[in-house]
Amino acid sequence: MNTETRQASSPPAAPAKTRLPQDEEIIDLRQIFHVLNSHRWAIIGFTAAVTLVAILVVFSMTPIYQATATLQIEQEQAKVLSIEEVYGIDGGTDSYLNTQFEVLKSRGVLEKVVNKLDLLNNPEFNGRLKEAPWYAGMLDWRSWFGLKEPEAPEDPGMIMRDTINTLAASVSIEPVRKTQIVKIHAQSENPQLAAKIANAIANAYIESYMESKLALTLNATDWMQGRMGELSEKLKVAEEELQDYREQENLIELEGVLNASSDELKALTNALVQVRSKLAVSENIYKQIRSGAMRKGDSQSLQAVLKHPLIQNLKQEESKVERLVTDLSRRYGPKHPQMISAKSELESIRQNMNLQIGNIVAGVEREYEIDKANERSLSAAVDELKQRIQITNRKEFRLRALEREVQTNKDLYDAFFKRIQETSATSDLQTANARIVDKAFTPKTPVKPKKKLIVAVAMLMGLLISCGIAFLLEMLNNTIRTTRDVEEKLNLPVLGVLPKLTDKTVLDHVFNLFTDKQQAAFGEAVRTIRTSVNLTAMDQQHRLFAVTSTVPGEGKSSVASNLALSLGQLGKTLLIDCDLRRPVVGKNFHIKGGSVGLANLLAGTANVNEAVHKLEGIDAIPCGMVPPNPQELLSTERFAALLKKLREHYDYVVLDCPPVQNVSDVLMVSRHCDGLVYVVEAGRMQSNAVSAAVGRLLQARASVTGAVLNKINPKAKDTYGYNQGYYDSTGYYSGAS
């Protein structure tokens, strides 16, 4: 009873950990440490293997040396004469320096280096000179069957191209920011060759620039000389056309001719205006005269004639004489000599007036005709002069066009002549745009491979990959491994845990290990299960228990036997082997084969007293003779009556039932039980398979008391603290793993 009291004081099962809400979940560092600790040897082994491979690879790599030459590229050109247009050099922007950096890496510069250092005969840069590995012929399957064709002669151009590409891969250009300095890095397996390559590239760049500058000057000179011949010929043709046109049109000085013609046109225009004004007056008088004569038939009635000054004078004299005649007629008679003289003078004045009127009319007509003829003559003269001026203008326009063409060709000819003189004067003056600041020296230490860094990175990568694989395996592992998995995935309380046994001497009698005093830890675990079973329903009399599992081999028979032995300390206990297909109770407790058992009782061929076998502390009913129809026997009323009868004689009855997944026998048995203990082997079955099996039991209305987590690794800490210290406190694992 002291032992039972001690067991009752211990917790029957690990309490469920309070879960945080979904949005408040935090990283469980203990779980991460548990995963890493569980796979520590695999992680260490994988990391060590990767590190070892990295060490072997690094030490098998050929060391590479790097030499550096420093070059200064002048951005401003030495301007002896103003001929930048010939070379097209723009030294005022960064584009010039960027262009020169690209020229440094150009194929032309690298080809000079290849030829100068004879890199075509260097196996490092000409891969065709490298010796093929000994296994190369074995990898060529065509040689196995004699199908290998003779190799075609290699193209020298392709060899040069590949060599230049290899050299370009080993050369890097590093401009120094905000300066005209550029560093040329060259890498090679030979430190002396690396320095030679860096210096050769700097010299080849300077030589290439000088050659290109000279070639550009010569090409510009040749081109301009060719253009000079063309321009000379065009100028000559233009001058000849100008002279021919002058001779053809008899042109001497058009400007004076145009000025004289303009003055003449102005004078004629003014005269024409005056004549037209006079013509308008005479035409008006003429029209009045003509219209008045036709209407009256009397020229004296014409107002235009009467207004003539001469007629006006005669009119005045006529009026004076008429007044005189009137006065004389009053004083003298018609026969008076003064009267006759006055009438004679009046008649003379009137005749003269008529004569003068006729003359005036005739004069007006003549003057109108003269003015009209003058207007026509002046108008024709003006039109003719305008035509002459227009012809002269057209000649002047053509002349000016020919003169402009001659002047344009002459200016272009003079400009090209001046450029040719400048270019010829500076063709022998060559200035380099760069100079070597520091020559490359032979390096003492290689720049790669960086052995320590590579090994460290490989070790870190191996560690990270192995840890990632461990966490991946952990996430993919859907088995029931911990008590937390039992509670969360199966929704069952944990009655207890049992350790995984590896000692062969212990495995031989695991079914009664509870009674082994040397295995005190195992006994404590079984007592915990017993206490948990009793505490699950303290207000009920749980006396008949069934023990089952998902599949065979999970240890349900061992759990049932040890649980029965532990219950035997509390009261009279009976162990019944209900696994009528693969019975083990009789074999484990060394009951004589062929003894009467449960099958005989259900078949009605024996009674209970014959089937019960006395063991150490408990009674047991083995299977007996294996029947051909176990399920039919377990579903009979005789089995229910048997269990009811056994309840009355025993305090506890433990039924060792078959697994759930294989057969449905346990579904028949569980209906008669007060509780059912479900055994789960840690890390074996997938959680969905175990959940399906438990679901079948619940659908059959089985009273599932809880689960026992069996074969758990005592050294692997689970979520609820069942770790090595729990078992070591009793000294159980002092000599077993």
Image: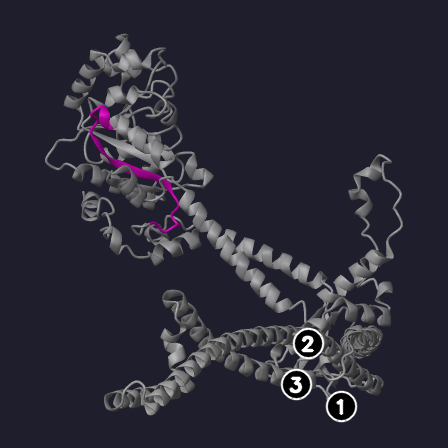
Instruction: Say which residue appears at 53% left-offset and 76% top-offset.
Output: 366
Which contiguous range is marked in magenta? 698-718
Determine which of the numbered discs, if any, sits on residue 392 in the image.
2
Q: Quadrant of residue 639?
A: top left
Determine which of the numbered discs, if any, sits on residue 260 in the image.
3
Q: Quadrant of residue 257?
A: bottom right
Q: Nearer the viewer, mark 2 or mark 1?
A: 2
Q: Nearer the viewer, mark 1 or mark 3?
A: 3
Q: Nearer the viewer, residue 472 or 260?
A: 260
Q: Position of residue 356 (x, y in %)?
A: 45, 81
**Mark 3: few, some, or many residues within 10 Å (few <14, many ≥20)?**
few
Q: Is residue 731 left or right of residue 574?
A: right
Which residue type carries mark 2? Answer: Thr
Determine which of the numbered discs, if any, sits on residue 80 in the image.
1
**Mark 2: few, some, or many residues within 10 Å (few <14, many ≥20)?**
some
Q: Is residue 166 left or right of residue 529?
A: right
Considering only order in the chain, which callout, 2 or 3, is on the residue closer to the N terminus? Answer: 3
Q: What is the residue that sits farthest to the left in this orientation?
A: 539
Which residue type carries mark 1? Answer: Val
Considering only order in the chain, which callout, 3 or 1, is on the residue closer to the N terminus? Answer: 1
Residue 395 within the magenta-colored segment of the rendering: no
Above or below, 400 against 324 in this view is above
Residue 700 within the magenta-colored segment of the rendering: yes
User: Which element carries disc 2, helix, strand or loop?
Assistant: helix
Determine which of the numbered discs, if any, sits on residue 501 in the image.
none
Residue contact at pointers 3 and 2, CB within 8 angstroms: no
Q: Nearer the viewer, residue 641 or 461?
A: 461
Q: Nearer the viewer, residue 430 or 360?
A: 360
Considering only order in the chain, which callout, 1 or 2, is on the residue closer to the N terminus? Answer: 1
Q: Position of residue 310 (x, y in %)?
A: 42, 86
* Whether residue 394 is visible: yes
Instruction: Say which residue appears at 24% left-offset and 53% top-offset.
Output: 20
